[in-house]
Image (cartoon, rainbow, N blue to C red):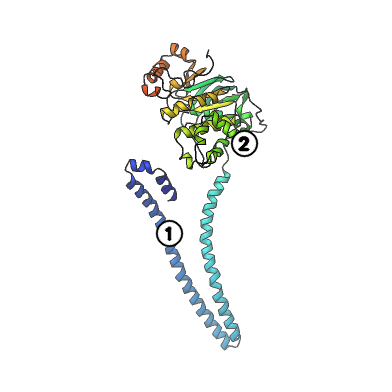
Amino acid sequence: MAAIAEESLSNVALVQAYNRQDTETERLERENRGIFEAEMVVTRLKELFSPLTDVVQVLTAVVVLALGTRELAAGRISVGGLLLFVAYLNQLYAPLRALSRLSNTIYSASASAERIIECFEEQPGIRDRAGAVPLRRARGVVEFDAVTFRYPGATRDAVGNVSFRVEPGQTLALVGRSGAGKSTLAKLLLRFYDPSAGAVRIDDVDLRDLRLRSLRDHVALLMQETLIFDGTVAENIAYGRPGATLQEIASAAEAADAHGFVSALPAGYDTLVGQKGRRLSGGQRQRIAIARALIRDTPVLILDEPTAGIDGESGARILDPLHRLISGRTTIVISHNLLTARDADCIVMLEEGRVGELGAHDELMRRHAGYMRLYRAHDRDPALADLAGEPAGHLSPWRSHRTIG
């Protein structure tokens, strides 16, 4: 019931916008009714048990007194002995009642213990194999070699026979429609899952031969949904590298174009941002996430739709920090918008989990009709050009500072 109440209240804007207050009230009432019925069953059993115990107590006392009186008349027991029996009998029922209440507690605790034991018995699907080695400072060569993967319980492969290679300092864009498998490839690179077939490698070493912790220490992830913890600005930036000094935090924030607005906050870097960063705007949260990735300083970077869900002005402001974040790193950009990927060194177009085409933007425009149609569909949309304040057809969010061959 508490979970339903929390879910309804946390999504109160959606509930009110769709006029589903009555539905949520009925859902909570339905759950409450189930709890009430269970409690009534317990109450009836308690009320039945107590009178039965009293009746047994009275009958037992009568039997003891009757037998005791007979033994007393026969001279085989004294009055003191009879009274002692009665006193012991009265003292017997209090522990029995306590034991009955304890049994209810034990049954309730055993049900909870079963759930806890189930959690303890769960084993992570991804673990270090025997002989796994730590990854030293990686150069950042990322390779997918004929990778195929299917989610547990799924009926079809999420990605199939995907191959590409990214050299240090290069940017590769994964593009395609929703559900094409772009985010799945990022999860495989972070070893949230292992491929069903093929191999993912960093510096020509299979990820399964590396210690998981050391692998993730070399990869920074900038997610589509900006995740911010309920803490201070400094704590959220330092989450990328625990133990970072305030000077390092401020330097990362300045590089992410966040120092200005952070300094204007009531307590600066010690300002509490609220649950999920609700006291900050979308662009501010994103710049803090960029600072968190910058301070992490990893050779491999994954950008999962970093400008999605924010307004054009905020999106334009984070472009320069994103350029600084990308510079000198092996970068994989995940996007369904071809305009955000056209200046990558290499573009991998995924179609239903497979590589439909691979190459630079100009090359794909010449030889792949599907890519050209999809790109022109985005290019004709003037709303997309607002992201960087450029005319449609001239948007370049990932324009690098070097010539792309």
Does residue 190 appear in this view?
A: no
Q: Indicate the secondary structure of the residue bearing disc 2.
A: loop
At label 1, which amino acid type do we have? Answer: Glu
Q: Position of residue 91 (x, y in %)?
A: 56, 74
Name the residue beneath numbered marker 1: 39
Q: Residue at x 48, y 40 (%)?
A: 276
Q: Position of residue 160 (x, y in %)?
A: 50, 24
Does residue 102 appear in this view?
A: yes
Q: Position of residue 228 (x, y in %)?
A: 50, 38
- In the drawing, does residue 225 fall left or right of residue 293? left
Q: Indicate the secondary structure of the residue bearing disc 1.
A: helix
At label 2, which amino acid type do we have? Answer: Thr
Answer above or below: position of 79 versus 247.
below
Q: Which mark is residue 306?
A: none
- In the drawing, does residue 188 fall left or right of residue 47? right
Identify which residue, 128 or 395, lies in the foreground. 395
Identify which residue, 193 or 339, lies in the foreground. 339
Mark 1 or 2, nearer chain start = 1
Q: Which label sits in the foreground, 1 or 2?
A: 2
Q: Residue at x 48, y 39 (%)?
A: 277
Q: Position of residue 273 (x, y in %)?
A: 49, 40
The answer to which image quadrant residue 218 occupies is top right
Q: Residue at x 33, y 44 (%)?
A: 20
- In the drawing, does residue 91 fall left or right of residue 134? left
The residue carrying pointer 2 sits among few (fewer than 14), some (14 to 19) or many (20 or more) residues within 10 Å by Cα, namely few
Q: Which mark is residue 245?
A: 2
- In the drawing, does residue 56 fall left or right of residue 131? left
